[in-house]
Amino acid sequence: MARIGQADAGRPVGKGARMVHGPAEDRGVGDRRMAGGAAADAVAAVSEGRLWDRLMAMARIGGFTTEEGHEGVNRPCLTPLDREARRLLIGWAQAAGASVSVDPAANLFLRWEGTDPSLAPVLTGSHMDTQPQGGRFDGIYGVLAGLEAIEALAASGVRPRRPVEVVAWTNEEGGRFAPGCTGSMSFAGFKPMSAFDDIVDAEGVRYADALAAQLAEEADLPRRPLGYVPHAYVEAHIEQGPRLEAEGQDIGVVTGIQGSRWFTVTVEGRTDHAGTTPLSLRKDAVQDALRAIAALNALMHDPTDVLRFTVGSIAVEPGTSNSVARRVVFTIDFRHPDEAVLRPRGDAIAGVVQAALKACTARVHERFTAWPADFGPTVPEAVARAAASQGLKAIRLPSGAFHDAQFLVPVCPTGMIFIPCRGGVSHHPSEYAEPRACANGARVLTEAVLELAGGP
Ligand code: GLV
Ligand code: MN
Ligand code: MN
């Protein structure tokens, strides 16, 4: 079995990963001794047309058109569609001269060799899975922008000191297997891979089985061990919010990611005849779930409108018109940039639910926790320099969406590049980013990656 990507070998990520990198300057991250001409050559080799054509080719895999004429994508992770998209990516990467490998979490890596293969790579990428009613840019843009950076380095003959690796993380969205980011969490040692084995999708398929099926389908690809310590990680993504477009900015230099806590609440009652059972005798799970949600809305009230609280899924059993509900399971997605808010209000959820119930019982389970992440200076500064050197308008902003980058923060210097998207709309089939905006982001990514990789 081929072993790839073990630069700076012997530093697997796992427990204590937080301790592995000291101040970025000590490790020479962000080394700026780079010939300006080489960066300019590489940036000039980014092709807006190629990147756009690839985005549209990927959008056909799982693509659908809504009644309103929006072209969305439904490409759940670890499915035949996901594999088809990965094969397309692999073909392009190999033609560009990158070597391909896959890790035990099915994270897919495309490696462009540097002049010193013993050095830790600069890692870039994002995810290829989508929400069920997803768009053409969320995730896949960052993977294809990373590949475009490799294409540009190859075409311009610019070879950095460090290898550059593009990663397509497994299951970022959590649309099929919740929670998301299981690939990056496994890679970063945030949780052992086995922690996700028993997650099931809507059809009852276990994550571990879907993962095994994917790895079996990709048995021809060289396998690499799980996790390593990259020199730096930088992820390009559509903003998924309205600021860049509204303020006429080309690039968002992302400063960090707000924290997220996901819960499932199971309300247990008793099913009864809807026509005959007096209300006073019922244990109606729907009615108690409504009481709980109303109480949670009060708990989450935020006059500043910074807090995000979403009940996005409600499942009712048995789910017929003429039966009182026996069980309701609803989800909570709670986010805030400040841990001092996220922690106490999240911790209060279980008590608020219990206090709101009239006739039923309830269980509250926290299934995903990502505390707010601060990217620090190193990668954001490299991104800001790249945008400035290209004459692009840039602002610093935090991310409201979560991203795989969040889990890389304890492992290595990390950052993200945002590009504007129309109306800030995302997780919707009408999600759209202009070809020029996509190319701007890829050019900034190319220059930032080249700088972080130590230049030619
Ligand atoms: C990621 O897709 C998120 O929900 O923030
Ligand atoms: Mn995404
Ligand atoms: Mn998403």
Image: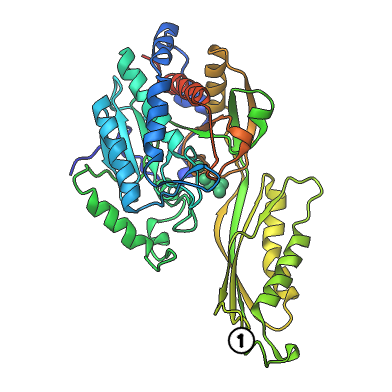
Residue 122 appears in the figure: no
Q: Which residue carries the number 1 mark? A: 270
Left-right relation of 293 to 214: right
Query: Residue 51: percent from the left, percent from the top?
Result: 40, 26
> Where residue 184 sits: x, y (%)?
43, 46
Amino acid at pointer 1: Arg
Q: Quadrant of the C terminus?
A: top left
Question: Where's the N terminus, which quadrant?
Answer: top left
Q: Is residue 312 above or below residue 241?
A: below
Q: Quadrant of residue 304?
A: top right
Res. 346 image quadrant: bottom right
Does the image show residue 408? yes
Q: Is residue 353 above or below residue 164?
A: below
Image position of 223 with respect to 329: above or below: above
- Reply above or below: 44 against 338: above
Secondary structure beneath dot 1 equals loop
Left or right placement of residue 246 versus residue 237 in this view: right
Residue 260 pos. (x, y %): 60, 51
